[in-house]
Amino acid sequence: MLMTTRRALLWLLITRSVTFLSLSLPAVVFGSVLGVVTGTVQLRGPSGTAIDPTGVVVYLEAVPASANAPGPGKAATPNAQVHQQDLQFTPPLTVIKTGDTVEFPNNDKVFHNVFSFSEAAKFDLGLYKSGTTKSVTFRKPGAVNVYCNIHPEMISRIKILDSSFYVVVGKDGTFRIPSVPPGSYPLVAWHISGAEVRTQVTVSRGRTEVVQLALDAGQPERRHLRKDGTPYGRYK
Ligand SMILES: [Cu+2]
């Protein structure tokens, strides 16, 4: 009987020690407090068949602001750049966060006039010459179409997100969003054509949520107007 009591006491001590250890050791030993959202996104063309999903943006919305805090050295990240080169914007798609600034350097020998009348950002940078640059700071989330008032073929898009939790997918369509705090969030897949699909995902500590997404690509934009609302000469 005495032994039994002693054993019970010993067991209690061991159990307490383990409990104490589990509280004091780093999370990596007993599993992360954060979760992962991963999966694939399928992009479908007009006939319903799968097409190259490169450039689809997959992101979580409404993740608590503290989780969006920039990490060490993040403030030193250079601004994104959209170049005007060979009468084209490069790259065609830029993904940024609200509050980020994008620079628009003119690398051509001719003048350009970069502008947008999208809801998320309206701006007109005016004419500026070769070798100079202007910039825009984007304050609202959304998708912005960037045009040149002289060359109608020049089109670029800027996707502004209120979230650090995003991935731009490649050819294989896979995505992985790590270090997500537990919670329930909208998960969105957005394509440059304007197509979008959204679902709700619940992230638990130390767990990986696997999600399959599919969206139908919209029609590419065929024409747009100049900044004063009139058609470009060659459209007449
Ligand atoms: Cu131009």
Image (cartoon, rainbow, N blue to C red):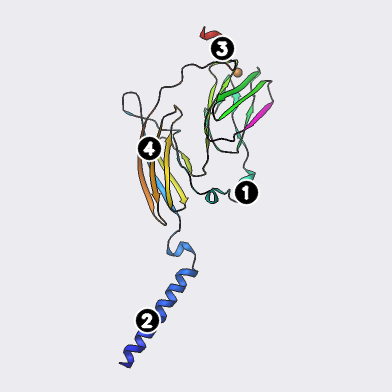
Magenta residues span 129-141
Give the left or right position of residue 4, taking residue 105 as reference. left
Q: Amino acid at mark 3?
A: Thr
Mark 4 nearby-residue class (10 Å; few <14, some 14–19, many ≥20): many
Give the left or right position of residue 230, taking residue 183 as reference. right
Distance from disc 2 to disc 4, alpha carbons, whole Å, reads 51 Å
Q: Is mark 3 within 8 Å of ligand 1?
A: no
Distance from disc 1 to disc 2, alpha carbons, whole Å, reads 48 Å
- Most foreground residue, 186 or 210: 186
Give percent across and percent down for residue 161. Answer: 52, 38
Label 3 sits on a secondary structure element that is: loop
Mark 2 nearby-residue class (10 Å; few <14, some 14–19, many ≥20): few
Distance from disc 3 to disc 4, alpha carbons, whole Å, reads 38 Å
Label 1 sits on a secondary structure element that is: loop
Q: Nearer the viewer, mark 3 or mark 4?
A: 3
Q: Amino acid at mark 4?
A: Val
Say which residue label 2 marks: 11
Say which residue label 3 marks: 230
Say which residue label 4 marks: 41
- Most foreground residue, 60 or 129: 60
Give the left or right position of residue 176, taking residue 125 as reference. left
